[in-house]
Image: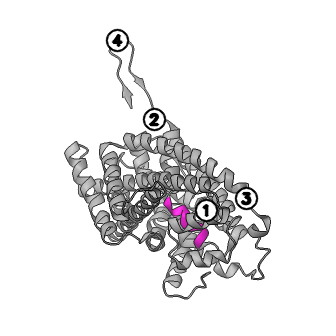
Amino acid sequence: MRVTSISSVPAVERSPSIIGGAMIIGGTIVGAGMFSLPVVMSGLWFYGSVAVLLLAWFCTLHSGLMILEANLNYREGASFSTITRDLLGRGWSRLNGLSIVFVLYTLTYAYISASGSVIHHTAQSLGWTLSSRAGGLGFTLLVAFIVWLSTTAVSRMTTLVFGAKILAFFLTFGGLLGHVQSATLLNLDHGDNHYWPYLLVTLPFCLTSFGFHGNVPSLMKHYGKDPQRIRACLVSGTLLALGLYLVWMLCSMGNIPRDAFKDIAQRGGNIDVLIGALGSRLNSANIDLLLTFFSNFAVACSFLGVTLGLFDYLADVLGFDDSPAGRFKTATVTFAPPMLCGVLWPEGFIHAIGFAGLAATLWAVITPALLARASRKRFGSPRYRVWGGTPMIGLVLLFGALCAVSHLLFVFGWLPVWR
């Protein structure tokens, strides 16, 4: 942001706060998707879940940094389409573009579905009557207006909502932590101690739950070509998300027995089902209310971050300018299709999160690694290079391939699922 002095004092250059960028990343990651984690990871249970979340955080953080490395060689505002087409060719760019649009549209639909479910549950707790469709539609229109305004508006709103979410998080999970039972957390009350057969099925969900990669070009557009500040945003935002995930897994798996998650999964695993299960276990109206408000903040943060990434990507691909009229056209293309799906199928949250995993392996993990390799060959990475060299690129590619294979095996019913 440039501030021009009207006096004889030279203009002062101010860079946006790192906190704002970290909140965009953390807010994008920690959203409604976190409510699917205890359900899909209940077979693996607590210690295995911690190990997989650490692996997913490490690989997705470095794939995001690889996007930054390649992106720095292009103009500010250049998206995946521009970078991938130039470095990897038109064929790969089209495939990557389809995967980006599929994932971001799918996640946008998932959050419309989740927002409708959460707002409906909130209205019920307050004694009001509001359908899931109406709640999701109204909330989506509000998010569309904020995204239409500017990236700065999204950053400020995300900072505000994320701060409220953290406050609600500690109020809620402070109570939940006090009720954690070690026997429940360690699964001592049940004879079934087979965990690792359920490892592979968790990988695509963990990958999707660390999805922030569409926001890396947006951050460079926001901060300029300042790799250290953008890297600080990525590291801080992803670490914050990881910490919140670990506390959430501790609270949920320390209060709900492993066998009880089978019933939650069979009922669709939606947010209101999980909140209801926790509330009934603790028999606490206050915790149920706090969980409800926290879920509202979680959906709002993730919704804003994901749609900002989709908005900027579509603007670059379709060539819409940054004027109010151009942003309105981009907002229409961004929100209209998932809104229609949200009206027709309002309860598709957990299914949408799962299907986003396969495509996410391509554009959030595999493509970034290939971009970093191609960028180093052509430009030599003069501004910034991710540490680890070729072995790090290989590790990220291996993680992406494993997630893709796991999701395909899951779709065909060839993986054991804790249900």
Q: Nearer the viewer, mark 2 or mark 3?
A: 3
**Magenta-highlighted residues:** 32-39
N-terminal of the pair, mark 2 or mark 3, is 2
**Residue type indicated by callout 3:** His
Q: Nearer the viewer, mark 4 or mark 3?
A: 3
Numbered disc in front, either 2 or 1: 1
Q: Which quarter of the figure has residue 153?
A: top left
In this rendered view, identify the residue nearer to me: 131 or 59: 131
Considering only order in the chain, which callout, 3 or 4, is on the residue closer to the N terminus? 4
Disc 2/disc 3 C-alpha distance (Å): 41 Å
- Residue that mark 1 sits on: 279
The answer to if 35 sits in the magenta stretch is yes
Residue 7 — which label? 4
User: Which dot marks residue 333?
Assistant: none
Mark 3, residue position: 179
Pointer 2: residues within 10 angstroms few (<14), some, or many (20+)? Answer: some
Q: In this view of the protein, which residue sits in the foreground, 218 or 307?
A: 307
Assign a secondary structure to mark 4.
Answer: loop
Placement of 270 over or under 291, stated as above or below: below
Give the mark nearest the N terminus, 3 or 1. Answer: 3
Callout 2: SS:
loop
Which x, y percent locates residue 296?
48, 54
Q: Is residue 409 left or right of residue 197?
A: left
Q: Residues within 10 Å of mark 4 (few under 14, many from 20)?
A: few
| x and y, in percent, of residue 212 in the image | 48, 56
Residue pushed farthest top?
8
Residue identifier under label 2: 16
Sequence-earlier tag: 4 or 1? 4
Residue 58 place in picture, x, y as percent: 61, 60
